[in-house]
Amino acid sequence: MHAKFVRNLRRSQLVLAALILGASALSAAGPPAVKIEKHANGYRLLRDGQPYFIKGAGGSQKLDVLAAAGGNSIRTWSVDPAVLDQAHAKGLTVLMGLRIGLPRHGFDYNNQEAVAKQRAATRQSVLKLKDHPALLMWGLGNEVELGVKPEDRPRLWSALEDLAKMVKEVDPNHPVVLVLAGLGGGKLAELNKYCPSIDVLGINAYGGMLTVPDTLAKEGWTKPFAVTEFGPRGHWEVSKTPWGLPIEDNSTQKADFYLKAYQHTVAGHPLSLGSYVFLWGQKQEKTHTWYGMFLPEGNRTASVDALSFAWTAKWPADRCPRIGPAAVKLSPTRTNTDDGTRIFAPGTQLLATADVAEPEGQPLTIRWDLRRDVSDAPQTGGDREEPTPPIPGTVLESKGNQATLKLPSASGNYRVFVYAFDPAGNAATANVPIVVK
């Protein structure tokens, strides 16, 4: 019995020693290294030696939904250590944004003291986070060149090149992405000349997604790229009302465009390392529904379905409602005729009708509201905008897919919004800009 006890003790000691040795080896190995590998047809990303195609989203909300939809990475626009832990817990990686001073916000790249201070702060951020296991790549700024005159860009590129070299010296295990506000204008040739240390070209593109491959080929770009933002057609790319305000695509049109853009530019391109869809969440930018793939209350829209199909080749079992071709009709109740002018007298009562369907044939709950139209807000580049709440007392009655609305007495620009929800809370939305005059 004593001999058996000794044998068991020795066996336990051996197991414990093996576990300690394994943990030590893992600690010595460090976090998964991320490299870019060139092959005959282009490039691919390797994480811990394994191919890794980015199926990502911009934002840190609803990570459970992202993982369930087939996503594997998220992008931030500034340093956020907590996001790394949150993503790691869900099996996701992070393109960590390094916030870089924007000339359009007053940062002066001729000010050597400010440039040096920014360099030091960036270095500290990299040192602090470079060994986190969820870190995938570094995102150097976001649309820093937006609004910069071509003759002033060389100094900006030189400063970004210095930052890229420094980041790679501090952390050789994670590539550096420089994020541009679209292509064209000679920017790619300038990057080749002034920023050779950039590993990956980050492209923010919306309606322009369909021209990205041609532009890359035309300008002779041969290094890898990742689409760091893509989404619906932007407010600068759509048709305008007669009074000059942008006409937003509805949620179904947006979803169809997301999928088309992904398939055209991201999937299968030899230089593509993947993409980050915008926005996996919600924000106010021109309207409260334009760029978010979710409504303010958290309801997902058809754009989530589209990306889930893009990433997994399978549609969700319960798909979001869809807006039909007629979208929203507005008729003054006194005439019951929609003449398409969208200009109404103060206090007019309107009959609003939504063309919406539920793919699985389930009942829909439809909600309406009216808000001030602030789509002419001067902010650019995603800069913060104040939200616009619904105007109380506008909806007099709502039944089925129709509602009676009473317009305000104050003249101005407004938008009529409709939202359709299935029993699970999946949503569709559309809006119509109008004038009270």
Image (spheres, grey):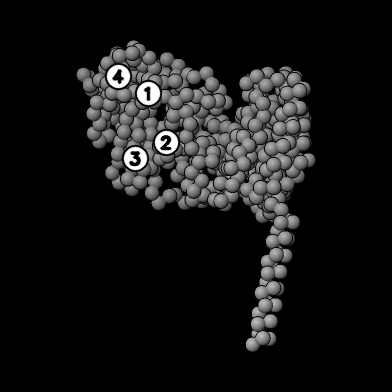
Q: In the drawing, does residue 255 fall left or right of residue 334?
A: right
Gap in Å between the C-alphas at discs 4 and 1?
Answer: 10 Å
Res 300 visible: yes
Residue type beneath disc 2: Leu
**Residue under the image location 71 percent in, 50 percent down:** 33
Residue type beneath disc 3: Phe
Residue 125 in the image: state x and y as whole percent: 69, 37
Residue 360: which disc? none
Residue type beneath disc 1: Arg
Gap in Å between the C-alphas at discs 3 and 4?
Answer: 24 Å
Toward which corner of the image does residue 269 lie, by quadrant? top right
**Label 1 element class:** strand
**Residue under the image location 33 percent in, 20 percent down:** 340
**Label 2 crowd (10 A; few <14 / some 14-19 / many >=20):** many
| Residue named by callout 1 | 371
| Residue named by callout 2 | 295
Residue type beneath disc 4: Leu
